[in-house]
Image (tube, rainbow, N blue to C red):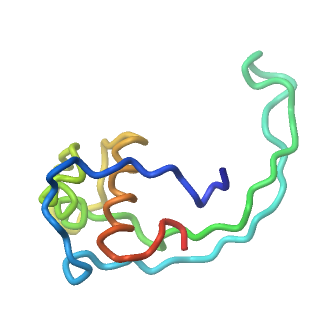
């Protein structure tokens, strides 16, 4: 699976419909793909061996998701984790799976596939 095609977690059954007017697609930056060396020949065994890794080009939001944006996902019952803080603060203390829920919701709410 390409890095920009993260597997999306489905929204919970019975979640209220969220319109694109409520969710705004973030401004995205196009990042080029490339190849890099991953791992280490000196550190922990789990880092060995070094290997060449290819990353496909992908899009990434230029700014972190805010507590206000995250709350929209929670209100839609598509995100289960609650993020605390002021509305314009960046979201913190969420897991990889929480972010997958948010990405799936944002994709559905804006009509834009994740990473597109």
Tell me what residue is drawn at x 53 percent, y 53 percent. Answer: 6
| Whole-percent x, y for residue 70 in the image | 24, 59
In-front residue for pair 83/7: 7
Tell me what residue is drawn at x 64 percent, y 67 percent. Answer: 58
| Whole-percent x, y for residue 22 in the image | 19, 78
Q: Report whether 42 appears left or right of 24.
A: right
Tell me what residue is drawn at x 38 percent, y 47 percent. Answer: 9
Question: Number of callouts in the render?
Answer: 0
| Whole-percent x, y for residue 91 in the image | 29, 55
The relative height of residue 65 versus residue 92 in the rendered view (above or below) is below
> Which residue ends up furthest to the bottom in the rendered image?
21
In-front residue for pair 6/28: 6
| Whole-percent x, y for residue 65 in the image | 34, 64
- Residue 73 sits in which quadrant? bottom left
- Residue 115 sits in which quadrant? bottom right
- Residue 43 sits in which quadrant? top right
> Which residue ends up furthest to the top in the rendered image?
45
Tell me what residue is drawn at x 15 percent, y 61 percent. Answer: 86
Q: Report whether 49 appears left or right of 107.
A: right
In-front residue for pair 70/22: 22
Q: Quadrant of the C terminus?
A: bottom right
In-front residue for pair 83/116: 116
The relative height of residue 50 versus residue 69 in the rendered view (above or below) is above
Q: Report whether 71 appears left or right of 108.
A: left
The relative height of residue 46 versus residue 108 in the rendered view (above or below) is above
Q: Report whether 59 appears left or right of 94.
A: right
């Amino acid at each position: 699976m390409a890095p920009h095609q993260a597997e999306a977690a489905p929204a919970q059954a019975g979640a209220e419909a969220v319109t694109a007017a409520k969710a705004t697609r973030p401004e995205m930056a196009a990042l080029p793909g490339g190849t890099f060396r991953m791992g280490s020949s000196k550190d922990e065994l789990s880092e060995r061996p070094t290997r060449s890794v290819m990353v496909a080009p992908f899009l990434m939001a230029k700014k972190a998701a805010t507590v206000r944006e995250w709350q929209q996902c929670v209100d839609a019952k598509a995100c289960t984790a609650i993020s605390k803080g002021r509305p314009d603060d960046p979201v913190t203390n969420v897991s990889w799976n929480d972010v997958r829920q948010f990405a799936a919701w944002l994709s559905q709410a804006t009509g834009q596939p994740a990473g597109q």
